[in-house]
Image (tube, rainbow, N blue to C red):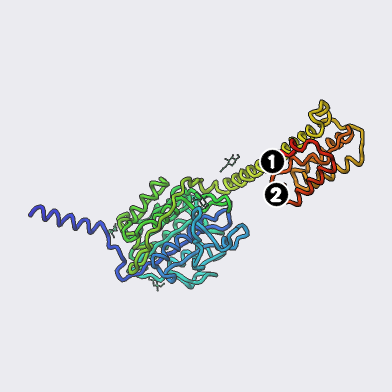
Amino acid sequence: MLTLTLLGLSIGLVANAFPTQNSGNGKNWVVIVAGSKGWHNYRHQADACHAYQIVHKNGIPDEQIVVMMYDDLATNEQNLTPGVVINRPNGTNVYKGVPKDYTRNAVTPDNFLAVLKGDSASTKQGSGKVLKSGPNDHVFVYISARGAPGLLAFPNDELYADDLLDVIIYMHKNKTYKKMVFYIDACDSGSMMTKLPDDINVYATTATNSYACYYDEKRKTYLGDWYSVNWMENSDVEDLSKETLMRQFKVVQSQTRHVMQFGNKTLANMKVKAFQGNANARPAPPMTLQPVLEPGLIPSPDVPMAILNRTYSSAVALYLNKLRSHLKGIEQLKQKMQKVVQCVTGDNRENPKILSVKMDRLQQQCYKDAVSHYKKHCFSWFFPEHEYYLRDLYTLFNLCGSGYRTDWYCIHLIPPSFYTSPQRFRSIQFLFRKFHIFRIEDNWK
Ligand SMILES: *[C@@H]1O[C@H](CO)[C@@H](O)[C@H](O)[C@H]1NC(C)=O
Ligand SMILES: *[C@@H]1O[C@H](CO)[C@@H](O)[C@H](O)[C@H]1NC(C)=O
Ligand SMILES: *[C@@H]1O[C@H](CO)[C@@H](O)[C@H](O)[C@H]1NC(C)=O
Ligand SMILES: *[C@@H]1O[C@H](CO)[C@@H](O)[C@H](O)[C@H]1NC(C)=O
């Protein structure tokens, strides 16, 4: 008897501690904001687009989703894949189908607050889409932006913590939600929520320090923010009708450490689907994501400098690569020229002199023939690394001046593939006959 009472009691407690999972007859509404513009801030809009894909594939219709983003990525001149925005290395296009409710200069704190209040008349320049949620509805708000104590940066303006709090309280009084969840990824975003009451059915998690992640060498920018990609990749790989907000929070916390929770934390026992999905629709099937081994985290405020540094480093790496191959080309030319001299003179003691000093005996015709022969068959000084070879032409000049014939000696330097063409083979035979070559066997190798 006693045991049964205890059991009943604990069931009651548990039921109380785990609020209803769906919003009854209610709908789920979503507001997504990317608070920046410009290619170097790519990640915020990429996060926002990705968030849209999550709530979209989990069945929330577009009329219940409001997206605010500057929308300067898809057509950006730095975008090598126009129309495509990704949020992880080799990721899928998250830009596809994203509603353009508030773009460019319509991404303002005023419009954002009007959207939350359901005050379409006060919005400016956007689609006018606002929350039309009621007392049975759930609202999920996700913001990815830059931040500072007590404020979030929008593209041209700031959203202050007290203004946001006023609107949340207004919504509560106006009964425009049953439960509401905020995810905010920005530096100091915790400071946006420190005064959030715990008795108005709002739960919020924030990044304390925001880290950019997933630097893309090709795009020369960071693809995501670490807090954001962690919750979103968790939503991608989990069954949202089983995963809870609490577990999602723990996943993000284990990766980023600097996260905080505010408001009524009991709400965290609810399923993710109650905010990121449609109560009456099946959740999207869990995806498999290739782990990214090195996320390359960098504190948000350092991002512009980190991009500069990385652009510089990769330019240096490219330069060193080109320089190396250029030097190698020069070295090969020098070696070839040495072989020519060795071959022409037959290991003569004069070789060092021929290779190093400019002599003054001119054999005009021999020199002309040699130059034209080498240019045609051996090196072309139209290639950048052969340019250098012009400097070594005095070697031919010297050979002629010392009475050597030179114009066939590049034959043994010709790669084997050269001989595969019968036409070329005939032209070599012709050269052999013309210049009475004795050392065919040697040179042939
Ligand atoms: C709630 O919002 C509606 C529409 O904006 C407005 O008519 C109503 O007066 C508000 N109610 C409260 C209690 O603020
Ligand atoms: C927090 O939310 C739970 C579940 O909805 C609710 O039972 C509880 O009363 C709320 N706490 C406060 C202080 O409002
Ligand atoms: C992305 O794709 C490229 C080429 O297919 C591959 O080399 C690279 O490892 C991939 N990166 C990740 C993080 O999957
Ligand atoms: C960028 O490079 C400079 C100069 O080497 C260095 O002082 C700075 O710490 C680097 N910053 C980042 C964010 O990589």
Disc 1 beta carbon < 8 A from ligand 4? no
State the SS at label 2: helix
Is 200 left, or right, of 130 in this rendering? left
Image quadrant assignment for residue 54: bottom left
The disc label shown at residue 420, or none? 2
Residue denoted by label 1? 323
Image quadrant assignment for residue 327: top right
Disc 2 beta carbon < 8 A from ligand 3? no
The disc label shown at residue 99, or none? none
Residue 375 location (% of width, % of height): 81, 45
Q: Amino acid at mark 2?
A: Thr
State the SS at label 1: helix
Q: Decide: few, some or many residues near mark 1? Use Cα within 10 Å; few <14, some 14-19, many ≥20.
A: few
- The residue lying toward the viewer, choosing from 227 and 281, is 281
- The residue lying toward the viewer, choosing from 189 and 79, is 79
Taking 343 as reference, is 140 above or below it? below
Taking 402 as reference, is 50 above or below it? below
